[in-house]
Image (cartoon, rainbow, N blue to C red):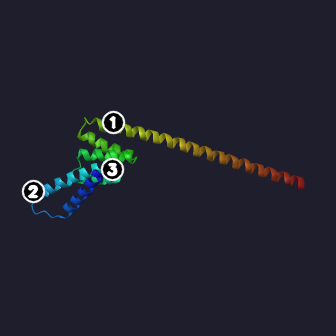
Amino acid sequence: DGHYYIACKKYKTITEYLKSTNYENEKDKAKAHELKLTTNSNMALCHLKLGEHAECIRACDAALELDSKNEKCLFRRGQSQIAMQRYDEAIKDFQQVLKLNPSNSAANQHIQTCREHLKAYQQQEKQLYTKIFAKMAQTSEKSNDETKTNKENTNDTTTTSS
């Protein structure tokens, strides 16, 4: 893990340097563009390995701004989305991977996993809301019974007083 941490720091230094540099000719701009892409992609991998998923997503986003069809960054961002339980976003990333590379079986597997998590989450939500509404119904019923009892007691008191 220490190696990934050190590598992340070095990649960050490189990206900051590349941002602050002005390039005179197209050849240098193209090389810098490629280096920024590679650096952000590698930094994303390091963050992924360190479990720093928000940072991984940021690095992938930076790389994808440079090349929206970067399969590795889409895949890594999807993995971090899963780790952060953002299953809908992960599915979108893996679907993009499949558009670029239809034979990527790992992307297919991750989509299935995300769908299973979403289904389980929806089932848990359904059970939670069922419990909430059942308790609300019980509370309402109890309140109605108490109101009815109070009215009966009031009527009994009124009839005995007369």
Taking the image as shown, residue 159 lies to the left or right of residue 147, namely right
State which tag comes first along the sequence, 2 or 3: 2
State which tag comes first along the sequence, 3 or 1: 3
Q: Is residue 74 visible?
A: yes
Labels in figure, total:
3
Question: Camera-side residue: 69 or 46?
Answer: 46
Q: Circles 2 and 1: CB distance less than 8 Å?
A: no
| Crowd class of label 3 (few under 14; some 14 to 19; many from 20; radius 10 Å) | some
Please give the label number shown on residue 109: 1
Return the x and y of residue 77 as percentages of the image width and height: 31, 48
Residue annotated with mark 2: 27
* Helix, strand or loop under label 3: helix
Return the x and y of residue 64 as percentages of the image width and height: 25, 51
Q: Is residue 162 visible?
A: no
Please give the label number shown on residue 50: 3
Q: Circles 2 and 3: CB distance less than 8 Å?
A: no
Q: Residue at x 9, y 56 (%)?
A: 27
Q: Amino acid at mark 3?
A: Leu
Q: Amino acid at mark 1?
A: Gln
Note whether 120 is above or below 36 in the view shown.
above
